[in-house]
Image: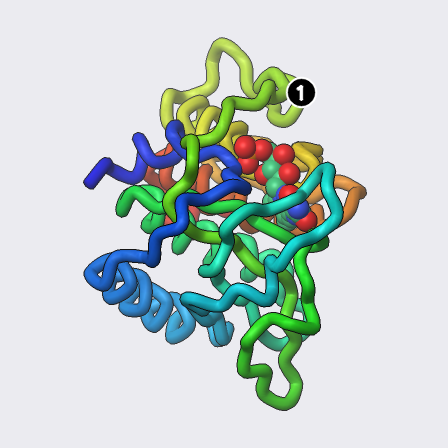
Amino acid sequence: MVDIREAIRERHSVRAFKDLPLEAEAVKELEAEIKVCNGLSGLNIQLVTDEPEAFSAGKPGYGKFRNCRNYLALVGPGGKDVEIGYWGERIVLLAQCLGINSCWVALTYKKGKAAVDIRPGEKLYMVIALGYGETSGTEHRGKPAGDISNIDASSPDWFREGVEAALLAPTAINQQKFRLELRGGKVSAKAGFGPYSKVDLGIVKYHFEIGSGKDSSVWL
Ligand SMILES: Cc1cc2nc3c(=O)[nH]c(=O)nc-3n(C[C@H](O)[C@H](O)[C@H](O)COP(=O)(O)O)c2cc1C
């Protein structure tokens, strides 16, 4: 099993999967992690396995998936976009450690067909496709650290490493519309304007914590 910092470097979005079920042991580990995440966050994230409908033949082009029969359904009360990103990415990175590839999917799936349990007051925000990829995906060009943070030559290593990990976070259409600023030993994290930028911010915050080695007390 690779370590979580390695998982951050190895993760890329994967949209074509081998026709293989998730291994039983991996499912157990994912379910246990989901339980912990839901307990800590109040979200209702669910793992759906062997369900072909949500990703059944879509239109060709961007966001087309092949052989996707497993996904995480990101369910929770309204107004929890940042939390959905943060806790969803925690499960994504565990999956990556277990050799399971993924792709966050807000739009290019059949929302009405997703097999999820939505309680009163909750909604399905989006899903995350999971499976053993035909490839492990490709690296995408990211913004320079100076464009998304106030990093400079005097910044401490932990901030630089946090920013580097944040730049490897998946964001909707690779927009990377977030800003991280070190101020008096703490970090301010702000979402820019763009589709799903608050979910992106949660994903980025989880990556930053792993990269920097800090916990959530680092946030201003
Ligand atoms: C919130 C969010 C929503 C996304 N929605 C979709 C989608 O609907 N369809 C899709 O194919 N990819 C989707 N993606 C994947 C992004 O396109 C991908 O993460 C980005 O291009 C960066 O590539 P990487 O994940 O390989 O680093 C989404 C990603 C995020 C974070």
What amino acid is found at the position of numbered circle 1 in the picture? Asp
Kindly tell me whether residue 84 is visible in this rendering. yes
Could you tell me which residue is drawn at 40 percent across and 44 percent down? 18
Residue 171 position, x and y percent, is: 62, 39
Residue 145: give x, y in percent of width and height: 57, 19
Q: Position of residue 68 (x, y in %)?
A: 50, 53
The foreground one among 129 and 75 is 129
Q: Position of residue 151 (x, y in %)?
A: 55, 19
Q: Secondary structure at mark 1?
A: helix
Instruction: Work out whether residue 24 or residue 177 is closer to the camera in this orientation and state it.
Output: 24
Q: Is residue 37 left or right of residue 44?
A: left
Q: Quadrant of ligand 1?
A: top right
In the figure, is residue 15 to the left or right of 131?
Answer: right
Residue where numbered disc 1 is placed: 147
Residue at 50% over, 73% down: 43
Q: Which residue is located at x 34 percent, y 58 percent? A: 21
